[in-house]
Image (spheres, grey):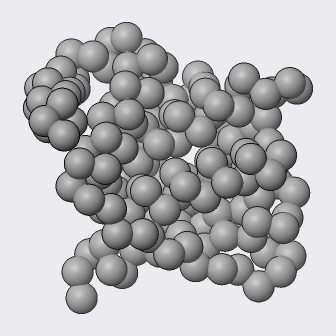
Amino acid sequence: MSESAKSIYFVDAHSNPVLVRIEGRASFQNSACLHDFVDEMLRQGKTRFVIDFQRCTSMDSTFLGVLAGAALALRKKDPPGSLVLARIGPRNLELVRNLGLHRLLTVDSGDTPMTFSTPSTALACPDRSEIENARLVLEAHENLISVDESNRGKFQDVMAFLKGRTEQS
């Protein structure tokens, strides 16, 4: 079984705030389903989210860019929404801080257990074409740059590559 196959997002879309629990690695391989879920929740008028990182083994810049995009969209709501990262470990917290996301969303490194009010649902990650995946990864990295301009230097090579890939379509 591949690493991405073992990684799952469990959600409780009926709670307020909406709860998401990450099991395994949060990465470009599985960020699309979280991106789509948050978009759908925003369409339904949900504006408060808590993501539980206790079982998140690692995360990459694409996943962090998806979080940044969600936080940016929530800030535009009237009144503004909220995105809380809960029970985040030291390594993942370091990644959040290195990219400046701690200034955009709330980080709660406490150990308060999260309970789902209804049985949680595992998100299904849709199959996407290579171009669709490249667009998502590009958008995620553009989000990171909009959060903190110093991220541009960190991701300029991947951005150039992805722009080339998406312009071919």
138 or 6: which is nearer to us? 138
In this rendering, the answer to whether 24 lies above or below 86 is below
- Up-down relation of residue 10 to residue 56 (above or below): below
- Residue in view at x 31 percent, y 20 percent: 151
Query: In the orientation shown, which residue stands out farthest toward the front?
Result: 169
Q: Is residue 123 left or right of residue 59?
A: right
Quadrant assignment for the C terminus: top left
Residue 24 visible to the viewer: no
Q: Residue furthest bottom?
A: 1
Residue name at image x 35 percent, y 69 percent? 127
Using the image, determine if residue 57 lies above or below residue 79: below
Quarter of the rendering occupied by the N terminus = bottom left
Query: Quadrant location of residue 149?
Result: top left
Q: Give the percent coordinates (x, y) of residue 58.
A: 35, 58
Q: Is residue 70 left or right of residue 49?
A: left
Residue 42, x across and y down, in percent: 73, 45
Percent position of residue 45, x then y:
83, 46
Name the spot of residue 29 as percent of width and height, x first.
30, 61
Looking at the image, which is closer to me, 169 or 58? 169
* Number of disc labels: 0
Location of residue 91 with respect to 24 vertically, above or below? above
Q: Is 18 or 85 nearer to us in this picture? A: 18
43 relative to 156 in the view: left or right? right
| Residue that sits furthest to the top in the current view | 149
Q: Is residue 128 visible?
A: yes
**Residue 161: quarter of image:** top left
Q: Residue at x 63, y 51 (%)?
A: 38
